[in-house]
Amino acid sequence: MNYYGIAMKYNDIMELDHRLRRWIRMCYLKQWGRARKRIGELIKPGAPKQQAILTCLSRKGYRRLAKTYATNCGLSKQYL
């Protein structure tokens, strides 16, 4: 029983880690403000140019943009 309890706690920690990374990505997007700045900042670390443009010109909210492909490539685990 104790073994399974430890495994369940690990899943909770991993879920919290994913949420924190998404929240940090959202904060970066908010900080950069305008679309042109966001595009440049996502391309610098290595996001695909076309994906970065489509993501940053989107009218969706910051929280939803924080889980897109371009944001995850540009603000990867190594970057954060």
Image: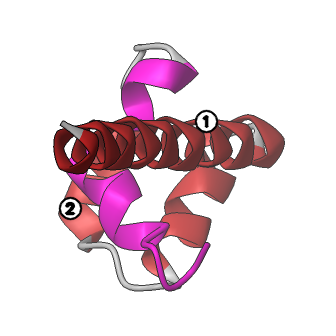
The N terminus lies in quadrant: top left
* Location of residue 49 in the rendering, given as x and y in whole percent from the top left corner: 28, 70
- Element type at marker 1? helix
Residue extent of the magenta highlight: 62-80
CA gap, disc 1 and disc 2: 24 Å
Question: x, y percentage for residue 56?
Answer: 44, 41
Q: Which of the colour schemes (rainbow, by chain, secondary structure, one colour) is used?
A: secondary structure
Dot label at residue 11: none
Q: Is residue 8 magenta?
A: no
Q: Identify the mark at residue 23; answer none if there is no mark.
A: 1
Q: Which residue is mark 2?
A: 50
- Amino acid on which disc 2 is placed: Gln
Q: Which residue sits at x=49%, y=35%? A: 19
Q: Residue furthest right?
A: 31
Seen as rendered, the residue at the extreme top is 60
**What x and y, as percent, mark residue 54?**
27, 42
Residue 31 vs residue 63, the one in the foreground: 63
Q: Mark 1 vs mark 2: which is more N-terminal?
A: 1
Dot 2 crowding, Cα within 10 Å, few <14, some 14–19, many 20+? few
- Which residue is pictured at 20% across the width and 61% down the height? 50
